[in-house]
Every structure is written in structure tokens, then in C-alpha cells.
């Protein structure tokens, strides 16, 4: 069954010595936290604006990976939750003057609501149909965003989203302060995902991913688990999108377009599906690449397509998956 | 002049005709997707890009070589089909032992490459393609004006769809194809070259998409992005119809085109989303799709 499932290889040796691995993971998380603290002071890459973008997309990719890597569900419409939450956060911050944490929470809640609605439809079908349904439903959100300019600003998007005072008191004036807010949200999100993966719920998810029929025969209500992971993933994607709207001060049609759904798949694929740290690495690689190649226009799309093809043909484990294989430890 | 529920008949029938034309494209494209999926177990995300290629090949043949519409109708699908054969031999063949989803991801990557290359070379503003001289003008049917070319699009796609149905359901080649879909190992054991059949099937599916592209060239402008949004609608059509039956794909394609056209008349705001809404309803009522078998 190993090569029939979509993500199994990287997490295959997970059974032995899990205490050992959790010690390694703890070290890595501490290192990640330390890195987040010092990153703005490192020259060349230390632009808070760039870093915030990377962190938001990294959280987005981690949310997506929760569903694909651990639930075995390929959603091709994750841009809908990310982009819609981004609109909600931007709109409430700009037009209602809400504080960032409330805007972000409302955005996350909208992602969850959308996830619940779309998830309960999509889980009625499996495999490629699931992917097509999520894509089609997300396209509906795109058309809605296009046709409701009073809410979304149409082609212009919602620009100059204000960074109001956090909790009504803490000013988020400059990029560096906002960066630390984003870093906290990111770390909290990733730790939550890590906790979900390693909970009994996460174990059942992996069982469903590896052998759905068996999980059903063991008495698990598979569809409830699928819907739950769908909603969790959509909420976290919403959290990432809402945070991005406040951090980058822009919510636009790009965030709800299908190409964004493709990008998050690519980030996860490059970093390593079904690994904890893979999507973070993948997001950093893809966003940096877009930054460096920005002057090339449509060639960026071609390069992304080529990376897609290469990853699927010869590099299915992704960067972190390959490193994990060398170390013989799931990362 | 009489009116139907406050809608002038010209507008109603005009939109119905446009709906039929869109429906023709939905039908041909979802038919191609279904044929490819049946044998390769891959959802061909490149389908939209290949439809766009068909239109561009016709444009290039006309403007660079001087070959007109009628030969293009045959040549463009063949050229695109050959490119499909190359894609299948180079890439897709390596994925058959993996999960279906990798096929989706690979063809998505290929679609990005093809669309990106065309956008770089031709820009994204769109190029005009003249209606062939024989099909200019139109007929006055009394209740509406029927442009000849639009009538031709509907007739041509119906003929192609029915011919495909006939080949697959009623001929020996189609019998091989259905046998290979059902059980490739056993079919191979009977001495039929299944890998070759798979390659040709992919080429044929791509050719169908390119044929739709040539038909579309004079109706819409030839644009690198013309297939990208269309393919998502076609995915919804496939989910609604189910991929089990060929006639089902044809009926669903035309039917949804007409519904979309009617929506444009009665409630234009919903015309872009109506197919997705129908998809949601079908998923609630009959999750396997209208003509689908539960997989």
C-alpha cells in the first residue's frame, strides 16, 4: 500500500522510539523560535516585510499539509479560506476600525465557516473528485469576490489596511513590531498543528489516510474525522490569510485565485508532504524564489510549473522528507 | 413583437444560443476528460491549456503559414495530439503506479508551463481570428437571428461528440478500449498492446480539446488564459455528470450550457456561479453524479 498513499514515505518510520523523536522535535521548535527572534537582525534576508510574508505563507502551507499530508485529502481550493479570511480581516480593520486581534479572529472564524460548508460537500466524494470539487467551490468564492466590490474592492482589493493598536493599546506602528506579532501567531499555529498531528485524533487521521476501508471497519466515523480536519485546516488557512492582511496591509483577488491554491500545493510538495517542518521550508523557498524572479514576469509561472513537474517525477519526498530519510527520523 | 415574461425573445434566444455554444465546449472537453480518465486514471489538468493550444495552433497556421480555418480544424488537433503523445510517453507513463493525485499535480504543473510560455510569447491581450468566409452572415429565423458560424459550432460539436460515442461504444477499437479500461492486465494478456492504446487515448483526448479550441477561436479571441478558467467549470460539469458514461458527459455539457445561458437572461449576477451551485446541489442529492457509478 505504501506507494498508493499520497504522503506516506516521510512518516513511515514513525512507529519506533517516538520519545526520541519528540525530543528532536522539541529542539527543532526551540531553534525555530530562536531563529524567529533573531531573523530581523540578519542582513540581506532580514526585511521584516519579506519575513512576514514568508511566515504567513508558511502557516498557510502547514494548514494545507495538515489535510494533505496527514489526512490524505488533496484540496485544490485552499486559496478560498486564505483569501476570504484575508478580506474579512482587512474589511473589519479598515471599515469597522477593529483591533488586529479581533480582525484576525473574525477572519479565522470566516475561514472555519467556509470550511464547514465546503467540507461537508466535498467529503461526499473521494480522490480526484474531492480535488475537483474543492477547486470548483473555491472558484465560486473568487467570482463572489470579483462581483462584490463593495466588500472586496473588486480589482483593486482592499488597500492600505490600517494596523490598529493591538488589544487597543499596543501600537503596531513599524514593520518590526508587526513582525513579532506575526511570528507569535505563526509559532502558535504551527505548535497547534503539531499537537493535532500527535493527538489520538491525528493517529486516526493517519489510519484513514493509509487505509480508509480498514478505519471504517474498526468503527471510526471516517467522514466526521475528514470534516473535522477539513474545518481545522480551513480555519488555520484563514488565520494565515487574516494575519497576512494585517501584516502586508493588503487583501486582493490574488489571494482567492486558483493559482494561489496551486502555490500552496507547490510549497508543501517542495518542502515535503506529511512532514512537520517541510511546508515551512517549502514556503520560504517558493516566496524567496518569487522575490528574486519578480522581474521575469510570466516566467515565474513557467518556473513554478517546471518545479511542479520535477517534484512529482523525481522528488516526491520534498526537501525535509529527504533530510528526514538521511537522519532516519521523521521531521 | 411578443414578449416572454418581460424578456424580448431576441435576448432570450440569443443567450440560449450562446449557452448552447458554451455547452458544446463543455461537452467536448468533459468528454475528453472522461475518455482520458477512463483509461489513464488521471485527471488531465492540462486540458484547458490544450484547448488554448488548439486555438493558437489554428492562429499560427493562418498567420505564419497561411493555412486557413478548414484544414486547421483537422491539423490543429493532430499537432496537439502529437504533443499529447509526447507528454504521455515522457511524463505520465512514470506515474501510473502512484496515487491518482500525482497525475493531477503533474498535469497542473504542465498547464502552468504551457500557459506561461504562451503568455510570454503572445502577451495576454488576445488575438483576433476571422470567421471563415463560408460561414459569415446569418439566417433570420423569424424569432431570432442565427449567425451561421454559431450554428456551425453547435452542429460540429454534436457530430464530433456522437462520433466519439459511436467509436467507443460500437466499434472493435472501442471494444478494446472499454476492455482495457475494465481490466488492463487481462486485455494485455489477449495480445492487445495496452500501453500503445493508453498513449493514443491520451493523444485523442488532447486532440478533442484542441478541436474545441479551433471552434472557439472565431467566437472568443485567441488568448493564453482562455482555457484556465474554463477548465474549472468543466471540472464542475464532470462532477455533476459523473465520468461513468459518455452520453452522460455530452448531455450534461449541453444541458449546463443552456442553464448558464438562461441564467444570463433571468439573473445575470449568478451566471458565473450557477454551475458551481448546481454542483453543490447535485452533491447533496446524488453524490455520485447524475450519470455516475459510485466508485
Image: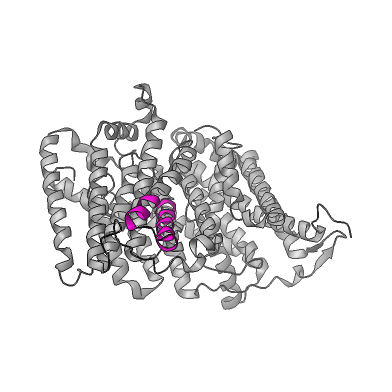
Is residue A329 depicted above or below A156 in this figure?
Answer: above
Measured from the top left, where is residue A195 in percent x and y? 23, 40
- A113 or A121: nearer the viewer: A113
Question: Residue B81 appears at what percent x and percent y?
Answer: 52, 58
The residue located at (65%, 56%) in the rendering is B22
Whether residue B211 is visible? yes
Q: Please give the range of residues in magenta.
A: A79-106
Vertical arrangement, residue A106 with respect to residue B147, above or below: above
Q: Quadrant of residue B251?
A: top right
Foreground: B59 or B274? B274
Is residue B170 a member of the stretch shown in magenta? Answer: no
Q: Quadrant of the N terminus of chain A?
A: top left
Residue A326: where, in percent of width, then height? 14, 48
Depicted A293 relative to depicted A36: above or below: below
Q: Residue A276's spot in the image, x, y percent?
A: 23, 46
Q: Is residue A65 left or right of residue A140?
A: left
Q: Residue furthest front?
A: A169
Horizontal arrangement in the rendering, residue B145 relative to residue A236 (left or right): right
Q: What colour scheme has been applied to the protein in the rendered image?
A: one colour
Q: For the image shown, how many numbered marks are present on the structure?
A: 0
Q: Nearer the viewer, residue A173 or A306?
A: A173
Q: Is residue B98 visible from the viewing direction of this image?
A: no
> Nearest the camera: A256 or B295?
A256
What residue is at 60 percent from the left and 55 percent from the top?
B272
Q: Main secondary structure of the magenta part?
A: helix
Amino acid at each position: 500500500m505504501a506507494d498508493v498513499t499520497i504522503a506516506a514515505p516521510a512518516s513511515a518510520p514513525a512507529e519506533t522510539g517516538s520519545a526520541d523523536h519528540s525530543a528532536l522535535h522539541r529542539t527543532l521548535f526551540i531553534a525555530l523560535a530562536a531563529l524567529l527572534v533573531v531573523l530581523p537582525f540578519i542582513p540581506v534576508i532580514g526585511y521584516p516585510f519579506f519575513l512576514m510574508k514568508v511566515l504567513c505563507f508558511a502557516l498557510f502551507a502547514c494548514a494545507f499539509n495538515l489535510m494533505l499530508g496527514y489526512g490524505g485529502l488533496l484540496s485544490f481550493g485552499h486559496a478560498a479560506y486564505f483569501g476570504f479570511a484575508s478580506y474579512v480581516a482587512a474589511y473589519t480593520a479598515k471599515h469597522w476600525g477593529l483591533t488586529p486581534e479581533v480582525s484576525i479572529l473574525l477572519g479565522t472564524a470566516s475561514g472555519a465557516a467556509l470550511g464547514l460548508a465546503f467540507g461537508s460537500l466535498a467529503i461526499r466524494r473521494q480522490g480526484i473528485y474531492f480535488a475537483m470539487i474543492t477547486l470548483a467551490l473555491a472558484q465560486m468564492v473568487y467570482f463572489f469576490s470579483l462581483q462584490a466590490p463593495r466588500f472586496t474592492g473588486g480589482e483593486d482589493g482592499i488597500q492600505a489596511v490600517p494596523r490598529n493598536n493591538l488589544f487597543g493599546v499596543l501600537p503596531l506602528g513599524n514593520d518590526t513590531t508587526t513582525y513579532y506579532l506575526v511570528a507569535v501567531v505563526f509559532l502558535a499555529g504551527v505548535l497547534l498543528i503539531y499537537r493535532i498531528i500527535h493527538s489520538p485524533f491525528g493517529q486516526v487521521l493517519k489510519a484513514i489516510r493509509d487505509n480508509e476501508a480498514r478505519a471504517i471497519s474498526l468503527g471510526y466515523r471516517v467522514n466526521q474525522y475528514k470534516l473535522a480536519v477539513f474545518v481545522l485546516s480551513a480555519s488555520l488557512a484563514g488565520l494565515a490569510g487574516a494575519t497576512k492582511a494585517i501584516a502586508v496591509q493588503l487583501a486582493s483577488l490574488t489571494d482567492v485565485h486558483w493559482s494561489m491554491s496551486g502555490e500552496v500545493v507547490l510549497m508543501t510538495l517542495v518542502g515535503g508532504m506529511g512532514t512537520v517542518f517541510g511546508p515551512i521550508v517549502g514556503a520560504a523557498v517558493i516566496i524567496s524564489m518569487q522575490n528574486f524572479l519578480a522581474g521575469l514576469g510570466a516566467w515565474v509561472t513557467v518556473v513554478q510549473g517546471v518545479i511542479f513537474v520535477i517534484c512529482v517525477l523525481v522528488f516526491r519526498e520534498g526537501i525535509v522528507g529527504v533530510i528526514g530519510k538521511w537522519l532516519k527520523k521523521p521531521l | 413583437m411578443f414578449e416572454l415574461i418581460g424578456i424580448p425573445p431576441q435576448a432570450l434566444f440569443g443567450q440560449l444560443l450562446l449557452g448552447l455554444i458554451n455547452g458544446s465546449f463543455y461537452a467536448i472537453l468533459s468528454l475528453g476528460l472522461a475518455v482520458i480518465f477512463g483509461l489513464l486514471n488521471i485527471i488531465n489538468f492540462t486540458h484547458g491549456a490544450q484547448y488554448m493550444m488548439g486555438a493558437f495552433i489554428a492562429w499560427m497556421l493562418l498567420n505564419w503559414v497561411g493555412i486557413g480555418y478548414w484544414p486547421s480544424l483537422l491539423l490543429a488537433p493532430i499537432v496537439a495530439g502529437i504533443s499529447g503523445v509526447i507528454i504521455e510517453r515522457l511524463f505520465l507513463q512514470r506515474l501510473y503506479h502512484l496515487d491518482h493525485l500525482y497525475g493531477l499535480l503533474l498535469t497542473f504543473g504542465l498547464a502552468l508551463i504551457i500557459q506561461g510560455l504562451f503568455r510570454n510569447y503572445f502577451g495576454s491581450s488576445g488575438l483576433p481570428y476571422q470567421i471563415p468566409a463560408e460561414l459569415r452572415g446569418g439566417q433570420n429565423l423569424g424569432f431570432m437571428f442565427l449567425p451561421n458560424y454559431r450554428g456551425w459550432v453547435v452542429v460540429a460539436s454534436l457530430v464530433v461528440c456522437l462520433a466519439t460515442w459511436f467509436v467507443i461504444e460500437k466499434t472493435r477499437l472501442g471494444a478494446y478500449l472499454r476492455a482495457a479500461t475494465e481490466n488492463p492486465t487481462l486485455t494485455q494478456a489477449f495480445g492487445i498492446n495496452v500501453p500503445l492504446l493508453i498513449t493514443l487515448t491520451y493523444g485523442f483526448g488532447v486532440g478533442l480539446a484542441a478541436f474545441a479550441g479551433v471552434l472557439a477561436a472565431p467566437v472568443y479571441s485567441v488568448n493564453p488564459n482562455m482555457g484556465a478558467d474554463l477548465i474549472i467549470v468543466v471540472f464542475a460539469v464532470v462532477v455533476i455528470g459523473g465520468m461513468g458514461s459518455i452520453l452522460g458527459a455530452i448531455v450534461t455539457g449541453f444541458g449546463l450550457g443552456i442553464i448558464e445561458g438562461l441564467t444570463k437572461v433571468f439573473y445575470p449576477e449568478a451566471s458565473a456561479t450557477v454551475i458551481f451551485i448546481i454542483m453543490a446541489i447535485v452533491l447533496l442529492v446524488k453524490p455520485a453524479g447524475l450519470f455516475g457509478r459510485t466508485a
